[in-house]
Image (cartoon, rainbow, N blue to C red):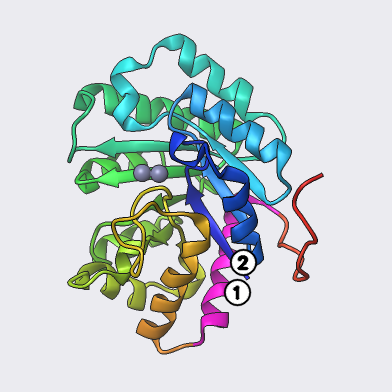
Amino acid sequence: MLIDSHAHLDMEKFDSDRDQIIDRALSVDVKQIITVGIDIKSSIRAVNLAKSHSSIFASVGIHPHNADNTDKNDLKQIPLIATQEKIVAIGETGLDFFRNRSSRQKQVELFKQQLDIAISLDLPVVIHDREAHEEILKILLSFNRNGFKGVIHCFSGDYNLAKTFIEMGYYISIPGTVTFKNASQIQDVAVRVPLNRMLLETDAPFLAPVPYRGKRNEPCHVIHTAQKVAKLRGISFEEVAMQTSKNTCQLFSIPFPNQEKPDSNKL
Ligand SMILES: [Zn+2]
Ligand SMILES: [Zn+2]
């Protein structure tokens, strides 16, 4: 069994076949999916998906790309949405200094505000870090509290950075890019990070692993990422699957999924 710790199931790209995609994941033992909001509307859709599917949990937050379009009212809504059932985290939040779709100053402000919300609700954070390693580290250090947890999703740094985040109590999430040719940095991270600090994710519909590279990604493809990690580490697929699932459940405080196959996820 596996868990896809980060997908965007609410996105338009899944509108035509969302239920089939969720069923397909279950049929290959991807037992749980964390669907992640990127703005208020998408967070509400994520919450609704979690309500209607037993295998889905939701994270509520505003992506750094949307920082410029975020106002105080949006921020006020996050805690209201996030205190519902099956909401397991705040995010995704963080910084994207690669695309710079919003001003850096607004991104930083919004990231800090969402960290405050996560702390006040005692929820972990889902962090997006693209070309902003130093700034993210600096901010997280200033927010460091006992027991504050989170994951650096779609990790894109080197092993030393991963080690620093792990020492601060964070988990590292390995995306499908680990299956790409010439992905030596993330492969090195996937080999050296302690297995009990690692999550796996698709970030679907983005970043499909080989052999689906370039196509729409979906949660069942997390299997290919797990297989690659197992091969790189020279351990069994089952060990990777079991430990990363345990880690995901621990981070997000969700029950470890039942090992038997469900008949159907529909009511
Ligand atoms: Zn992201
Ligand atoms: Zn994402």
Q: Residues within 10 Å of mark 1 (few under 14, many from 20)?
A: few
Within the image, what quadrant is residue 88 found in?
top right
When asked about the image quadrant of residue 180, the answer is bottom left
Residue 121, image x and y in percent?
Answer: 60, 32
**Amino acid under disc 2:** Lys
In this view, the residue in front, 157 or 212, is: 212
Confirm if mark 2 falls within 8 A of ligand 2.
Answer: no
Range of residues picked out in magenta: 236-254
Residue type at mark 1 is Met
Q: How many marks?
A: 2
Q: Considering the image in quadrants, where does the N terminus appear? A: bottom right
Residue sitting at x 52%, y 42% = 9
For image coordinates 51% across by 56% down, the residue present is: 219
Main secondary structure of the magenta stretch = helix
Can you tell which mark lies on residue 242?
Answer: 1
Q: Which mark is residue 246?
A: 2
Q: Let me know if residue 238 is in the magenta part.
A: yes
Of 180 and 174, nearer the camera is 180
Which corner quadrant holds the C terminus? top right
Q: Which mark is residue 214?
A: none
As helix, strand or loop, the secondary structure at mark 2 comes to helix
Q: Are marks 2 and 1 in contact (CB under 8 Å)?
A: yes
Spot occupied by residue 79 in the image (x, y as percentages of width and height)? 58, 23
Q: Is residue 228 left or right of residue 146?
A: left
Q: Could you give the CA–CA distance between mark 2 and mark 1, rounded to whole angstroms?
A: 6 Å
Quarter of the rendered structure image containing ligand 1? top left
